Amino acid sequence: MTTIPTLTTERLTLRAPRLSDFDAYAAFRASERARFVGGPDNQIKAWGQFIGLPGQWAIRGYGRWIAADRDTDAPVGVVGLLYPIGWPEPEIAWSIFVEAEGRGLAQEAALAARHYAYETAGWTTAISLIDPANTRSVALAERLGCQPEGAFQHAIFGAMQIWRHPAPATEGMHA
């Protein structure tokens, strides 16, 4: 079993999920905002996805964290390293809950996750798969220095754009 590391940024703690995070996670998964990540979902489906967060850490040795407010520990999103079956390659993924949107937290968390991917997990490249209609995530990918690299058709999620992250040697230039 892999221990899920804790990362800290200026305003966030990226940490293992806790049972107390589930209500916020389920509310996000039930909302229209989850349409870009396969939702909206009912609470039962959200539970399966929630308990899958530590599962990828156990199986792959990396995964996604709960992004929590550093001062209050309130969950504000899910961010990290994702590589499910059917993906073309490992991804840096982010979902920020509505109450935390518009404050730059997704960028802060994604940069920390990318640094972890390159410096700790040993990745040499990373992508983010983004629904073209998700203009906020497209804008974030651009701010992170990602470049569009074509399309990917997923059986469930449909057409997604592949955004390539800067290589490890240049990734710090987009902080």
Image (spheres, rainbow, N blue to C red):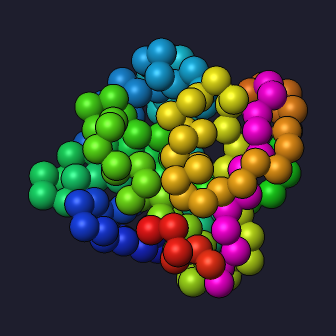
At x 52%, y 75%, the residue is 173
Residue 154 at x, y = what percent? 83, 32
Image quadrant containing the N terminus: bottom right
Is residue 90 positioned above or below 154 on the image? below
At x 70%, y 44%, the residue is 129
Q: Nearer the viewer, residue 139 or 21?
A: 139
Can residue 65 be seen?
A: no
Residue at image location 36% in from the left, 24% down from the top? 27
Q: Which residues are magenta?
A: 158-169
- 44 relative position to 60: left or right: left
Q: Quadrant of the C terminus?
A: bottom left
Instruction: Where is residue 83? Give x, y as percent.
Output: 71, 55
Q: Quadrant of residue 139?
A: top right
* Residue at horizontal 67 percent and vertical 38 percent from the top: 130
Count of marks placed on residues: 0
Q: Is residue 71 magenta?
A: no
Query: Picture coordinates of residue 123 (x, y %)?
Result: 70, 76
- Residue 168 located within the stretch drawn in magenta: yes
**Residue 47 higher or lower than 93, as above or below:** above
